[in-house]
Image (cartoon, coloured by chain):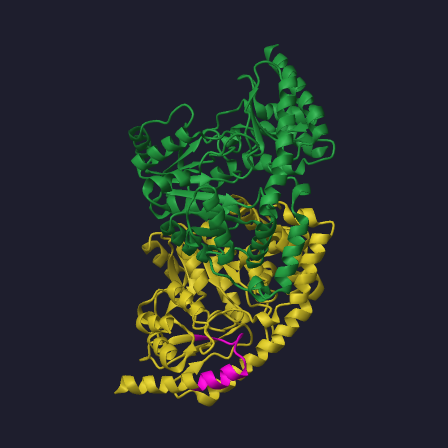
Chain colours: A yellow, B green
Amino acid sequence: MELADLFATRAARMKASEIRELLKLLDQPDIISFAGGIPDPALFPHEAFRTAYAEVLNGPNANAALQYQVSEGYKPLRTWIAAEMGRIGIPCDEGNVFITSGSQQALDYLGKLFLSPGDTALVTWPTYLGALQAFNAYEPTYDRLSPGTGNMTPDAYRAAAEAAGGRVKFAYLVPDFDNPSGRTLTLAEREAVLDLAEDLDIAVIEDAAYQALRYDGTPVPPILSIDAARSGGIDEARTIYCGSFSKTLAPGLRMGWVCAPRRIVDKLVLMKQAADLHSPSINQFAIHHVAETVFAEQVARIRGVYGARRDALLEALEASMPAGVSWSKPEGGMFVWVTLPPEIDAATLLARSIAEARVAFVPGAAFHADGSGRNTLRLSFTLADERAVSDGIPRLAALIRDETQRLAA
Amino acid sequence: MELADLFATRAARMKASEIRELLKLLDQPDIISFAGGIPDPALFPHEAFRTAYAEVLNGPNANAALQYQVSEGYKPLRTWIAAEMGRIGIPCDEGNVFITSGSQQALDYLGKLFLSPGDTALVTWPTYLGALQAFNAYEPTYDRLSPGTGNMTPDAYRAAAEAAGGRVKFAYLVPDFDNPSGRTLTLAEREAVLDLAEDLDIAVIEDAAYQALRYDGTPVPPILSIDAARSGGIDEARTIYCGSFSKTLAPGLRMGWVCAPRRIVDKLVLMKQAADLHSPSINQFAIHHVAETVFAEQVARIRGVYGARRDALLEALEASMPAGVSWSKPEGGMFVWVTLPPEIDAATLLARSIAEARVAFVPGAAFHADGSGRNTLRLSFTLADERAVSDGIPRLAALIRDETQRLAA
């Protein structure tokens, strides 16, 4: 148990990236993990991928699938995505679609495109850790977007950005089933973000990685959809939608896309040409094949399984957790966000949890651009089967009770 | 012939990226193209790829091939590459190997790692256009490396870099069968580059994209091999070797690697985690399978075909070209570099060549960081079959004669 020991000693002082690396290594059989934000491999459409790669490599496109490709991506795949975007309320064509190596690459490119050192990015507290890591390379300052409790005035954001030595460049958010908070923005909250962005004349980055994973409730239109309707069309909009096949089909192909005004797509294509030429041709052909044949049924299947796991986790939390602990009730996605009593530090709790309860989760401070949120933690339910939930959550709840008593003593 | 018309009108004023995009589109049946620097798809190991993807997706690694992967890359592939590096004189282990999405991504990351605006990168005149494009994103100044005629003194490079507002950060070069010049550096020239780098205390980026494609002559040790021997081991070295499977197996998988001191690998891994998490898992598994089964015979096969095409091109140039035109005699790689009489502008010649001779090539100025080299051009022989050479080169030669007369008139 060397790793667990290391964790127990160091977790409270570790950097986010270190925690994430260690959590990966901690996938040991006797640890119940709610930590990794990864899809359940048992749900990958294996047969569809086998067929897709075989047909691509045996068919008339075999040479093209192994050869260099244009930087914007394989046109039939971009056309398929444009139709899918239309289906969720974003009228566009394949010229508005740019293929990326996962949505993480979109975040990196958008950071590179918009941010100079000292510029300000608006993000929620908490927000996706990977977005902060991508943007950090370009040395921005962060200011807080508060869709629920109300944003600051545009003048206040402007003044703060100037004081930090730059300008506000974009607002980044995960409007559907946020990682880590599980939160979905209402229509009014989305409109308020757009109002703010218009006043500040900045871009909105809509991270839609979980958009397809809704288990109940009513879909809320994507921000890009609202923006395009207001502005007179996608090419007049300011919102950049980042989509991903990682959660619906499989993450190992690193396949995502940007749907955006053509002026933005043009810039991203030039960046990609200089940075990695294009995303792998063969995976674009294979994903296109799989998407055309099984996308709808695959999404329905994972919605069923993940929805049931979310239900089980929420029931277990309700049955086990002591007073003073609260959590989100997400309508989709992969995560439940837990708020502990203010005196409990989730990183310290994790160290004890690994050593004593043998339960893993991700402490919440890493998701906060200002390092706050020390009494929060993220639980992922995508890999949490019935036994994990029925054993793990009571063990975690007992530990939280014990930690509360320890701190009170 | 709309594209050709556009080309004829605009080629002389076009940016490098525009020229490259147009050249791609110009792959028309009646144009003989020596332009695109791409491998011949007829030589891709199709059967090995079919087997590899089928076995990966049917075998015990199917889930891992579709799931997230560590940022440094699939360990068995890194181990295979480390052994291959050892075979060419670079003793290392898999901890010195980092998987990239093509060697282009390595160049982008190295630009990001080393360059701040105003810093100086040392490159040859001419050099690989894609390297300039990757580095340009980080706003460097370029100074000239002259391995053949002798470099400037370290003090002169230092003074020039300071005058440009930064410091010299690295020397970049393609020591084997350079793109575009076809040139291979001698052992003494490689040692002189290392001497200079040591004196300036800078990194050396060794772009080895063509290293395996030697058709005759004696292999010269990689710069990293010389450096590691001098420094006492790879982890004490300053050279970063960038390898690629694009020219040996297939470019469409976007699979390359960096072999470097561990301190550099560690930094690149963190950058990749923030930028695109990892290169596609499934392609790493598939490339590993193909490399283990057919790498040596595949390399032997393409050496045979490309070597014969190089011979045919050199013979045709010898037989057709007028006095005043000279060209490189590369021992490997994909390119022959042609120097025209000084009064001929290769971009203007290209416009005429597309319109009249129906022969495409890449004008050389784009490969020069200072925009010089207007009387140079690059011919690629990887796709040039017997008919293309026997028809195309005499047509190009006749056009050069005509252009010389036109300018003299």
Q: Is A329 situated above or below B278? A: below
Q: Nearer the viewer, residue A252 or A309?
A: A252
Q: Nearer the viewer, residue B280 or A294?
A: B280
Residue A379 in magenta?
A: yes
Query: Which residue does the image show at 35% across and 48% down from the upper left?
Result: B235
In the image, taking residue B253 as reference, residue A165 lies left or right, namely left
Query: Which residue does the image show at 54% across and 74% down from the upper left?
Result: A382
Q: Is A280 situated above or below B154? A: below
Q: Residue furthest bottom?
A: A319
Report x, y in % for residue B108. Answer: 46, 45
Which image quarter holds the C terminus of chain A? bottom left
Residue A217 visible, this angle: no
Which image quarter holds the N terminus of chain A? bottom left
Image mark count:
0
In the image, taking residue A61 as reference, residue A320 lies left or right, namely left
Q: Is B250 situated above or below B270? A: above
Question: Quadrant of the rendered structure where residue B332 is?
Answer: top right
Residue A119 in magenta?
A: no
Residue B51 visible, this angle: yes
Report x, y in % for residue B370. Answer: 45, 29
Report x, y in % for residue A13. Answer: 31, 68
In the image, taking residue B357 as reference, residue A149 lies left or right, namely left
Q: Is B388 situated above or below B272? A: above
Residue stretch in magenta:
A378-394
Report x, y in % for residue B46. Answer: 67, 49
Q: Residue furthest left?
A: A409
Q: Residue furthest top?
A: B409
Q: Nearer the viewer, residue B19 or B153?
A: B153
